[in-house]
Image (spheres, rainbow, N blue to C red):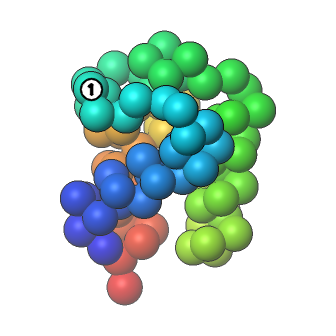
Amino acid sequence: MESDEIKKVLLDIILEIDDELDTSNIVPEKPLRDQLDLDSMDFLDIVMALRKRYQIQVPEEDYPRLATLESAIAYLEPRLSP
């Protein structure tokens, strides 16, 4: 899966969690939690959605690697590529 597709997947998951969020102005290198006011349950919902849809296991120690859109894409790209 290409990085643009991964970005779309992540943003779609975020919008499913809270469809009132504005994801159009996300700065890729800034923490998503700060930009979107996501709490820890929202973050876990993102991790669970990735696991459910794409069978990706994200160990708790890797959670910081999903902090920004940029780092999440870099982390997920090799895991979502065939």
> For mark 1, what is the residue?
25
Examine the image and state in which quarter residue 37 appears: top right
Examine the image and state in which quarter residue 81 appears: bottom left
Question: What is the residue that sits farthest to the bottom in this orientation?
Answer: 82
Image check: 15 left or right of 44?
left
Instruction: Classify 10 Å Cα crowding around label 1: few (below 14), some (14-19), many (20 and above).
Output: few
Question: What is the residue that sits farthest to the front in this orientation?
Answer: 20
Image check: 77 left or right of 32?
left
Name the amino acid, label 1.
Answer: Asn
Which structural element holds mark 1? loop
Task: For residue 19, say whether it is visible.
Answer: yes
Q: Is residue 13 above or below residue 24?
A: below
Give how far across and how far down residue 50 sits, in percent: 60, 61
Give how far across and how far down residue 31 sits, in percent: 42, 21
36 vs 22, nearest the viewer: 22
Q: Residue at x 53, y 32 (%)?
A: 20
Examine the image and state in which quarter residue 49 appears: bottom right
**Tag count:** 1
Task: For residue 29, say whether it is visible.
Answer: no
Q: Is residue 80 above or below residue 6?
A: below
57 vs 10, nearest the viewer: 10
Q: Residue at x 71, y 55 (%)?
A: 48
Give how far across and how far down residue 17 sits, in percent: 64, 43
> For the C terminus, which image quadrant?
bottom left
Q: Is residue 50 above or below residue 75?
A: below
Q: Residue at x 42, y 47 (%)?
A: 11
> For the N terminus, which image quadrant?
bottom left
66 vs 20, nearest the viewer: 20
43 vs 76, nearest the viewer: 43
